[in-house]
Amino acid sequence: MKKILTIAACLTFSAGGVMAQQTFPRNGVYDERAGLVVFTNATVHTDYKTTISNATLVIRNGKVEAVGTNVKVPAGAVVMDAAGKHIYPGLVDMYSDYGLPEVKVERRNWRAAPQMESTKQGAYNWNEAIRPETNAVELFKVDAKKADELRKQGFGTVLTVHRDGIARGTAALVTLAEKRENEVVLKDKAAAALSFDKGTSKQDYPNSLMGSVALLRQTYLDAQWNAQNPQKEQNISLRAFTQANSFPQIFEADNKLNILRADKVGDEFGKQYIMKGAGDEYQMLPQIKATNAPVILSLAFPDAYNVEDPFDARRVALEDMKHWEMAPANAALLQKAGVTIAFTAHDLKDKKDFLPNLRKAVKYGLSEEEALKALTATPAKLLSADNLVGSLNKGMLANFIITSDNLFSEDGVILENWVQGEQYKVSDLPTDYRGVYTLKLGNDTGRKLLINGSAEKPELQVISKDTVKGNLSIKGNLVTISFAESKDSKESIRLSGWVAGKNLQGEGQLPNASAVKWLASYSEAMTEQAKKERAKKEADTAIGSMIFPFRAYGQPELPKQETILIKKATVWTNEKEGKLENADVLIKNGKIAKVGKNLSESGARIVDGTGKHVTPGIIDEHSHIALHGVNEGTQAVTSEVRMADVVNPEDINIYRQLAGGVTTSQLLHGSANPIGGQSAIIKLRWGKSADELLVENADGYIKFALGENVKQSNWGSTQTIRFPQSRMGVEQVFVDAFQRAKEYEQAWNTYNKLSKRDKAKTPSPRRDLELEALVEILNEKRFITCHSYVQSEINMLMKVAEDMGFKVNTFTHILEGYKVADKMKEHGVGGSTFADWWAYKMEVKDAIPHNAGIMNQLGIVTAINSDDAEMARRLNQEAAKSVKYTGMSEEDALKMVTLNPAKLLHLDDRMGSIKAGKDADVVLWNEHPLSIYAKPLKTFVDGIAYYDVERDEQMRVDLEKERVRLIQKMLQAKAGGAKTQSPVSRRTQVMHCEEVEHSEEEAYFAY
């Protein structure tokens, strides 16, 4: 049987010869014999769920003609005996860049002038990151070397994607045959590709994740408008984008959160994306499942960390350790949850790791059937190519692999890969030398050789008084062996020789340089002990528990809502009742149920508040925590971007600030441009998803900014292109933006008043997300928080607002508020300020610590904010400073971080005070809440103790235990020969507005 296969391989046989291109001119004589080959006695897996033993497979003209047990061998066929072999459908890689030019993204030169507009010539989109007119098939070129690399892993077909830009154009489905491009393309436009990565575009916009989301959202709207009004604008890109919408949509997301972000955009425009994942999807399994998106899974598993040095081990984050352990189970966990999965080898640095990692995924719980399905039927079906590839039914392409054993077995070897009926030899069937040998070394017969490992990569142990590892190489019939005489010996015995039947023999040299003859006589197959040792070397597939969120201080189970009765505490109500001594607070169903004395409630958990204080949860009006990026600073007006698009629910600052009594934060855009992005107001529900953090039915807010940052005075000498460059230019930006918004609203009002008949013949206005947000301000549906310092600019914006017909809701920072407090009160604007920040830039040289007290005394709703992740953990102390500087009452001081910010956010009917019916956002303090010694003992959000000091102490113990367990597992993995990587510390960036002044590069991402 082996002999027949070898002969056939030498023929370089082609069963697909008649598929040669008929439109090409002929030069010479072609071999036009019908490709007819038959495999007999094989185990044929016709699809992922059907296996036929002792089967016959007939291939004619590059396609499957017949398969089964009662198939007659056609006359004239080349017959190949495949007894003992397995035949599988050729594997399909659903995300590749095979055959396409490399996409080289150059790092931006921050000292160069920005590029505001597209430099691409032609009637294309205004933004170079939107390039749906790109067709991968037009760039595709057969690459024999890379094709061979992929064929060796069992692939016969790949979807090739040009990975450049946000809208990337169409991907092509091609085979890995070494033929003309025209012959290997199965579908020239098999899918459309998208991402949040701007790729090679050198345009400044977008420079943030939220900008990418906004640009994609606007592109959908523009494409719809262009399709409905083609006479308005000839745009090749938008037309191509619309055409590509009819294909399967594959979205490359580089992490689990981006999958959820992309899905929201898809849902908004009626698109069900196929997600290209990154391997961390199991960490948010319920949310990933809820998207209903098929996921293309990476099989690039992280290496263990080298944690032998305890100091290095401290640099490895818990989530990185847990991901190393759990990543191989990703596929199994998703599949068992009902998520449709496919695989790709794309992320692997070395494609040779694909099959080992696939088998590892099977060891971690993925069934062989589902693994094969994910590599054959699923990608074929998702790409509407299941009539071509993915199975070996009659009429399908003759794409298949021949293996020596079960594909998922450690000993399984891919022998041949047939693509479009053409044979590509992958490897020879390895001779299995594993077993126990008696070694005769001269006259010494006291040693045994144990050869184990895999047939392809045998490993050697030499057993005598000691057991030592040896080196073994068998190439063809030639053998080389070396091993130490004993464990303590540094000198080696070196042997060379040849295979003689089942034995090994030859000559060698002892450490004393004397020559010796040797014979290794085969005595038995692998012993039970050897099998146990082999099993011991294999990875421990047990994995730790999931935690929410997936990082330090995450928990296997989130705390539950309870009925809580806090007894005999000092209760700071922030209501007309003031401060109540020896009072009780009942929390029930997430609300404050009762406040008073001697309360009781059946079934409530009693919390002793004796000597303790209860306050409303702290509300931070100005925060930048829990965000993936803060600024889209590339244009003067970016009101289309939304902080809600980039909320990061795993930011450790959420937990840290709960430990400081914070329960609600407004997440603001930065101060890089006059009109920034839309805010997100969140509750600090640690462990919940990004959407679950958002405060339900909260009013919409947006960040405006004045001063040095927006005119780029501290951005460096090359940043002189973007308007405005002066304070008077800032005023004109506001006037122009709102004038355009008014005209935009009028255009829509006029159009919406038309009759159905008139609408049918009248082009609709183009939807503009930037202007829609400004129209919301004009209609009091969105409210402004404005970064501000200098009184002249504060007055300017209030005047612009009054002239244009809107109001400013809040001036934040407002360090010269004491100078214009009378005008602020007249305008009806609140102030959210610092307690005593000053002297960090010229704009704040007139700041005084009495600012908050003066504004408060004049009746302005005044809050103290953080603008800083660290400061937010002690906002109670920041509020207390106004007691010191201005003699403010303690209750008014506390209101500046509770009730007053709630008023500024229009949430004071739900939070900010201890009152029956309000949200149970409550903090239990060990001391007077304005004291520097005060610490929260429990922080409740919606009646759930998201922070509890006693639970926190236990979590610290548990966290260290988990780290020790994972470190020991990594040490064992390294001892067993696993690859390791050097520990790398994660840098946590603490964001605040004034980081704009640090450097030119940081200025570009100005907060």
Image (cartoon, rainbow, N blue to C red):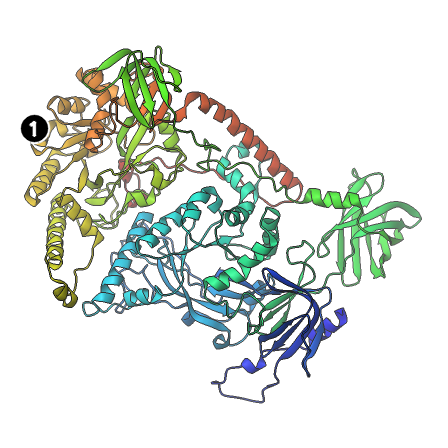
Q: Residue at x 45, y 33 (%)?
A: 554
Is residue 838 something one can see in this rendering?
no
Q: Is residue 327 above or below residue 342?
A: above
391 or 217, nearer to the observer: 391
Q: How many marks?
A: 1
Quarter of the view holding residue 372? bottom right
Residue 355, x across and y down, in percent = 60, 56
Q: Residue furthest front?
A: 602
Decide if residue 949 is on the left or right side of residue 542.
left
Q: Amino acid at mark 1?
A: Asp
What residue is shown at x 8% (from left), y 45% (from top)?
804
Q: Residue 818's image quarter?
A: top left
- Tell me which corner region of the image, top left, top right, bottom left or bottom right, holds residue 468: top right
Q: Nearer the viewer, residue 737 or 614?
A: 614
The location of residue 593, given as percent across then percent down, is 29, 22
Left-right relation of 669 to 403: left
Would you say residue 752 is visible in this rendering? Answer: yes
Q: Residue at x 34, y 19 (%)?
A: 924
Q: Considering the image in quadrants, where does the C terminus appear?
A: top left
10 Å crowding of disc 1: few (<14), some (14-19), many (20+): some
Could you say whether the residue bearing mark 1 is in a helix, strand or loop? helix
User: Which quadrant of the rendered structure holds the N terminus?
Assistant: bottom right
Considering only vertical position in the picture, is 195 above or below 1004?
below
Q: Position of residue 716 (x, y in %)?
A: 26, 46
- Left or right of residue 204, residue 859 in this image: left
Pointer 1 residue: 822
Q: Position of residue 692 (x, y in %)?
A: 35, 38
Q: Is residue 62 above or below residue 147?
A: below
Decide: is 638 above or below 170: above
